[in-house]
């Protein structure tokens, strides 16, 4: 099988084509290892856990943002995917990817080399939402949650910070200042936590020109997340809470 891989040194770029001996249940990450071992040791890509836990191997595979370690070659050969360029419910043409497997770096971030991107812009936004519970509180006592409280934040706590949603977000593509889906989903994870005592402060962090109001609400982030985190639900949840908060302030 042929793998068409985008190569780059951060400035110019081109595609190299490699023949891969595909084995049953082979992942795209294993195929990249085979190329690196047998054909081109300079091929660069990031990985760590190889088990869809660390989020390091996010890339664009057949024009779709995915984890290389959990994408099986046999499942994606000759598939049809939605165009990553267009967005909106009725403006998303299907594209046939062809017989080759196309592998490119994750979009919306600067490329360092080949399939390795610079995650710093993503983490810069992530740090802005202060992803931790209650700034100044240091308690020795364990703070317990009920099972139903845990369920309220569970799906958001599942984020592995793989950056896939950021790489798929049309707003992040055109506006580097947008906080982005993962950071906003994480803000909601702490906002909705029953142990949280600074809800208003979290609202003020996301109620900004680069926060929730910039989102186009096209659910692309929800569609691509490998851990089924729903960032758009967090964003629309925040929008409702902010509006309610503003109304409350008027009648105060
Ligand atoms: S929300 Fe999903 S896609 Fe986005 S960083 Fe977290 S795990 Fe990855
Ligand atoms: S719903 Fe919002 S955050 Fe998610 S991909 Fe679309 S524009 Fe980006
Ligand atoms: S190598 Fe860790 S998620 Fe793929």
Image (cartoon, rainbow, N blue to C red):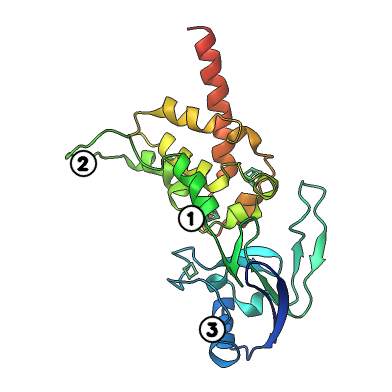
| Crowd class of label 1 (few under 14; some 14 to 19; many from 20; radius 10 Å) | many
Farthest-out residue, left: 140
- Vertical comparison of 60 with 130: above or below: below
In the shown orientation, is residue 101 left or right of residue 182?
Answer: right
Farthest top residue in view: 251
Q: Residue at x 55, y 14 (%)?
A: 247
Q: In terms of depth relative to the viewer, which is nearer, 156 or 87?
A: 87
Q: Is residue 248 left or right of residue 216?
A: left
Earlier residue among tags 3 and 2: 3
Does the residue at mark 1 contact the one at mark 2 (Cβ under 8 Å)? no
CA gap, disc 3 and disc 2: 44 Å
Q: Nearer the viewer, mark 3 or mark 2?
A: 3
- Front residue of 65 and 194: 65
Residue 50 picture location, percent across and down: 46, 73
| Residue 133 badge | none
| Residue at point 56%, 83% (across, down) | 42
- The residue beneath circle 2 is 142
Cα gap from disc 1 to disc 3, whole angstroms: 23 Å
Give how far across and how far down residue 234 sits, in percent. Answer: 54, 39
Q: CA distance from mark 1 to mark 2?
A: 26 Å
In the rendered view, tell whether residue 192 sits above or below residue 245. below
The reply to whether the residue tagged 1 has its Cβ within 8 angstroms of ligand 1 is: yes
Residue highlighted by disc 3: 33
- Disc 3 beta carbon < 8 A from ligand 3? no
Number of the front mark, 1 or 2: 1
Q: Which mark is residue 161?
A: 1
Percent x, y of residue 161? 48, 55
């Amino acid at each position: 099988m042929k793998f068409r891989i985008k190569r780059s040194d951060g400035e110019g770029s081109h595609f190299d084509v490699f023949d891969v001996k595909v084995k049953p249940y082979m992942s795209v990450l294993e195929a990249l290892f085979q190329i690196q071992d047998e054909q081109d040791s300079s091929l660069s890509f990031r990985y760590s856990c190889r088990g869809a836990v660390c989020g390091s191997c996010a890339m664009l595979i057949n024009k779709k943002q995915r984890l290389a370690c959990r994408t099986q070659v046999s499942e994606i050969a000759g598939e049809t995917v939605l165009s990553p360029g267009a967005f909106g419910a009725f403006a998303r043409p299907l594209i046939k990817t062809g017989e080759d497997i196309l592998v490119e770096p994750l979009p919306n971030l600067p490329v360092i080399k080949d399939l390795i991107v610079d995650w710093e812009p993503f983490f810069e936004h992530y740090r802005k939402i202060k992803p931790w519970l209650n700034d100044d509180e240091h308690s020795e006592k364990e703070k317990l949650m009920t099972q139903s409280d845990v369920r309220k934040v569970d799906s958001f706590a599942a984020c592995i910070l793989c950056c896939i949603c950021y790489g798929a977000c049309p707003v992040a593509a055109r506006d580097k200042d947008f906080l982005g889906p993962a950071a906003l989903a994480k803000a909601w994870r702490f906002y909705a936590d029953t142990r949280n005592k600074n809800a208003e402060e979290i609202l003020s962090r996301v109620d900004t020109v680069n926060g929730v109001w910039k989102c186009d609400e096209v659910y692309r982030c929800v569609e691509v997340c490998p851990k089924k985190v729903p960032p758009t639900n967090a964003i629309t949840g925040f929008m409702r809470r902010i509006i309610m908060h503003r109304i409350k302030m008027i009648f105060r």
